[in-house]
Amino acid sequence: MWMTDYIREIKRQFVEVYGFKPLPNSTKHEYNVEVPDGEYPMTIDGKLDKVRIENGGISCCNFE
């Protein structure tokens, strides 16, 4: 999976799994979403990634 696809999947899960509201300029293909700081476990490509949001930045590929 390309990194752009990986980030797109993270944003999709923020909306569809965690229930954050997409911003008005979002599309179904590319969600834009504001997420509070924290850790958000996500399963992507069969691996558990502990995605972290800090000051608006995404830290991903934090596998167990």
Image: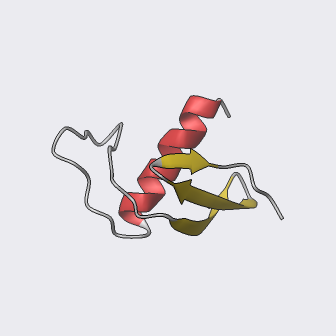
Q: 20 and 57: which one is in front?
A: 57
Using the rendered view, name the quadrant where residue 42 is placed: bottom right
Picture layout, residue 34 above or below residue 26:
below
| Relative vertical location of residue 47 with respect to residue 11 in this rendering, above or below | below
* Along the viewing direction, whichever of 27 and 55 lies nearer the viewer: 55
Q: Specify whether 30 is left or right of 43.
A: left
Quadrant hosting residue 50: bottom right
- Numbered circles on residues, count: 0
In this view, which residue lies farthest toward the left? 24
Q: How is the image coloured?
A: secondary structure
The image quadrant that residue 62 belongs to is: bottom right
Residue 7: horizontal and vertical position, in percent?
54, 41
Q: Quadrant of the N terminus?
A: top right
Q: Nearer the viewer, residue 44 or 11?
A: 11
Q: Residue at x 80, y 58 (%)?
A: 63
Residue beneath the point at 25% across and 39% down: 27
Where is 20 relative to 3, above or below? below
Where is residue 3 shown, x and y percent of the image?
63, 32
User: Residue 25 location in percent, x, y?
Assistant: 19, 38
Whether residue 12 sits left or right of residue 33 in the image: it is right
Residue furthest to the front: 55
Q: Residue at x 63, y 49 (%)?
A: 59
Which quadrant does the C terminus fall into? bottom right
Spot the residue most to the right: 64
Q: Relative to residue 43, is residue 57 drawn left or right?
A: left
